[in-house]
Amino acid sequence: MGYVFDPMPTPILAVAGSDDLLPVRRIFCVGRNYAAHAREMGRDPDREPPFFFTKPADAVVHDGETVNYPPETENLHYEAELVAVIGKGGRNIAQADALDHVWGYAVGNDLTRRDLQFQARELGRPWDWGKAFDRSAVIGPVHPVADIGHPDRGEIRLEVNGEVKQQADLSEMIWSTSEIVSLLSRSMTIKPGDVIMTGTPAGVGPLVEGDVCVASIEGLGELTTRIGPRV
């Protein structure tokens, strides 16, 4: 018995300072995890618990790659994020134990077709078409916890063509990494290779063809993305 067609290659992330590769199983994203960003999206952060949406594993884009301007949108946005990568699986994980399940951290950029996201939101529909499109999960090399610990403060920043668009501190996250991992594990079993994009600060905005977008987090380096021609 064989496959009807060849199985998809396993999506991978780079590992900082190593030739090793990290296989990606799933990508979870946390919505509105910085108060100022929640407000700029028209929501009150004090009244809403965290929520999750997903991207396909093969939406991963590595540092230095070009992302062509995607179809069906006139409003492509950047979103700089801290990314946590799970290295040990579990379910119903206590918050006190949650960080033991994190293998490492990276800089991420949650590319968003904002016009499609807003259309879906207004109609009460899922966000998939606005968030889960091809090459929408830009993620840099993963830094092992053994090397950097668990970053819970430090500057998160994004520039477009050298102009600062987002600038905040990881300490401003409403829900910490340990809380996010614990909450996620109550809904489903997390496993090694699961990737969590933990939310973006205020200042999100549009990208156009030719833009160079650089996201950075203190201690995790920079993540550069070029926006290519529309496809």
Image (spheres, rainbow, N blue to C red):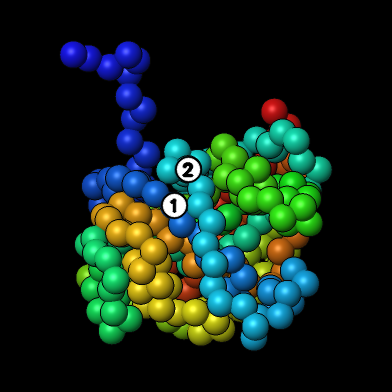
Q: Is residue 97 left or right of residue 59?
A: left
Q: Is residue 138 left or right of residue 102?
A: right
Residue at the disc numbered 2: 56
> Which amino acid type is marked by label 2?
Pro
Hey, which quadrant is residue 91 in on the image? Answer: bottom left
Task: Confirm whether residue 161 shows in the render.
Answer: no
Hey, which quadrant is residue 210 in on the image? Answer: top right
What x and y, as percent, mark residue 75?
A: 78, 48
Rendered residue at 41%/78% (across/down)? 179
Tell how many labels: 2
Report the front residue among 210 and 120.
Answer: 120
Report the front residue among 123 and 139.
Answer: 123
Q: Quadrant of the N terminus?
A: top left
Rendered residue at 71%/80% (across/down)? 44
Look at the numbered disc 2 and give the secondary structure of its residue: loop
Q: Are marks 2 and 1 in contact (CB under 8 Å)?
A: yes
> Which amino acid type is marked by label 1?
Ile
Residue at the disc numbered 1: 27
**Label 2: few (<14), some (14–19) or many (≥20) C-alpha neighbours in 10 Å:** many
